[in-house]
Image (cartoon, rainbow, N blue to C red):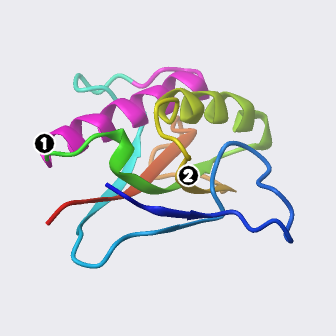
């Protein structure tokens, strides 16, 4: 899919591996993925934020597959972590997920006070687009 990516030369470059903007062509099919948390199919929650983030991206990959899409269809990532100390491990998981996406999707990362279950440290949602 031919997305247009925007990272203008006259504004500050992205802080990490993401694009400032991504345009989805008219007539594309859009997939909005609910926020995924680091809970496995057997309801286990890893202790580390990095492992939780890896599970979030695993779940997202499965949703994309079921929708007939793949990570390259992701145009935007919204992520939430419960503390500044989780930023690096989350970003490492995001970069692994995005390793084959060039240029990378737009991305936002926010620090929040918590989630519905106190042991959760990361939540990730994506928007993907594909041919109609």
- Residue at the spot of label 1: 66
Q: Residue at x 22, y 45 (%)?
A: 69
The spot of residue 92 in percent (x, y) is: 64, 28
Whether residue 87 sits left or right of residue 100 in the image: it is right
Tell me if mark 2 has few (under 14), some (14-19) or many (20+) residues whose alpha carbon lies within 10 angstroms of its own.
many
Where does the image place residue 2, in percent across and percent down from the top left?
Answer: 37, 58
- In the displayed structure, 58 sits above or below 25; it is above
Residue sitting at 23 percent across and 35 percent down? Answer: 62
- Asked if the magenta segment contains residue 86, the reply would be no
Where residue 82 sits in the image (x, y, percent)?
A: 66, 46
By secondary structure, the bulk of the magenta-drawn segment is best described as: helix
- Mark nearer the viewer, 1 or 2: 1
111 displayed left or right of 52: right
Q: Left or right of 47: which side holds 110? A: right
Q: Quadrant of the N terminus?
A: bottom left
Q: Tell me the quadrant of the picture where the C terminus can be found.
A: bottom left
Residue at figure coordinates x 41%, y 35% from the top left: 57
Residue 79's label in the rendered image is 2
Q: Is residue 111 left or right of residue 53?
A: right
Q: Quadrant of residue 86?
A: top right
For disc 1, the neighbor class at 10 Å (few under 14, some 14 to 19, many from 20) is: few
Q: Position of residue 55 (x, y in %)?
A: 40, 28
Marks 1/2: CA distance?
A: 22 Å
């Amino acid at each position: 899919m031919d997305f247009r990516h925007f990272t203008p030369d006259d504004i500050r470059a992205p802080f990490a591996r993401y694009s400032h903007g991504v345009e989805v062509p008219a007539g594309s099919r859009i997939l909005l993925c609910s926020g995924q948390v680091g809970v496995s199919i057997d309801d286990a929650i890893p202790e580390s934020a990095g492992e939780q983030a890896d599970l979030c991206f695993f779940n997202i990959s499965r949703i994309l597959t079921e929708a007939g899409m793949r990570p390259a269809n992701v145009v935007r990532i919204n992520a939430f972590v419960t503390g500044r100390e989780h930023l690096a491990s989350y970003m490492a998981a995001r970069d692994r997920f995005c390793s084959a996406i060039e240029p990378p999707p737009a991305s936002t990362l926010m620090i929040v006070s918590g989630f519905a279950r106190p042991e959760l440290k990361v939540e990730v949602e994506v928007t993907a687009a594909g041919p109609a």
